[in-house]
Image (tube, helix red, strand yellow):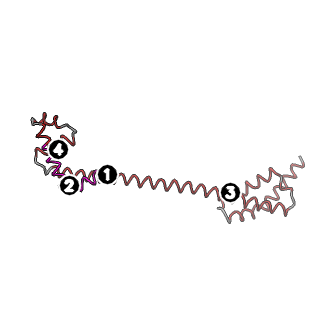
Amino acid sequence: MEVKDQTTNCYQRIYLEYAPMLLRFAGKFVSGFFAEDIVHDVFLKLWDRQVFLLPDDDLKRILYVAVRNACIDHLRRSNVEQEILDNRAVQLKLDELDYFESSDELFMRKDLLDLLMKKVEELPERGQEIFRLSYLKGMKAAEIADQLGLSVRTVENQLYRSLLYLRKHCSHLFFYFFTLI
């Protein structure tokens, strides 16, 4: 029991003597909070190895080297963690930009579709109706002809004229509209 008390006293003396200097030393490289953790960890490792039984000069050198190495390890870990955080932040920004880019495309498509529909409104009434049934409702020429009581040839002719008119007056819209889809 006496040897254990002597060992504890020796350890306590070394801690009280060297800890303040080691804290200042570590504080030059890392924040005070981490400096305390590093110094305490070094002393715990030394307790396990009973290095505190060495002569003071050797002990001092070992303590400073151990704290220096622990600071280096901490800074490397922090650097890796920061790189991971930076990469995640960059990825979040890229994802956000992709989201805004896709929403801009949606707005542009809607605007282009609105412009195209305004041009469709300039068609004759029968042409508008046939165009809407064909392109907005997806009906075939025969179905439109049956519904409107027209011949299939008349429906096809009206669609052809409508498309000619729209190509002539909105060719630039078709280019943008189909490149965005």
* Image location of residue 8, percent across then percent down: 84, 52
Q: Which residue is mark 1?
A: 180
Tell me which label, 4 or 1, sits earlier in the chain. 4
Where does the magenta region start and end? Answer: 157-180
Report helix, strand or loop for mark 4. Answer: helix
- Residue flagged by tag 2: what amino acid is it? Cys
- From the image, give the main secondary structure of the stretch colored magenta: helix
Inspect the image, locate mark 4, and give the three-letter code of the amino acid beneath it: Phe
Residue 110 in magenta stretch: no
Rendering coords of residue 106 (x, y %): 31, 51
Residue, disc 4: 131
Of the residues under marks 3 and 1, which one precedes in the sequence? 3
On screen, residue 14 versus residue 179, left or right, reads right
Q: Name the quadrant containing residue 41.
A: bottom right
Is 172 a magenta residue? Answer: yes
Query: Which badge, 4 or 3, comes first in the chain's sequence?
Result: 3
Task: Identify the residue at horizontal 70%, vertical 62% (top origin).
Answer: 26
Q: Residues within 10 Å of mark 2 (few under 14, many from 20)?
A: some
Residue contact at pointers 4 and 2, CB within 8 angstroms: no
Sequence-wise first label, 4 or 2? 4
Q: Measure the alpha-carbon separation of dots 4 and 1.
A: 22 Å
Relative to 2, is 31 on the left or the right? left
Residue at the spot 24% in from the left edge and 52% down from the top edge = 174
Q: Are marks 3 and 1 in contact (CB under 8 Å)?
A: no
- In three-dimensional space, the C-alpha distance between marks 2 and 1, rounded to whole angstroms, equals 16 Å
Location of mark 3 (residue): 73
Q: Amino acid at mark 3?
A: Asp
Distance in Å between CA atoms under marks 4 and 2? 15 Å
Question: Mark 2 or 3 closer to N-term?
Answer: 3
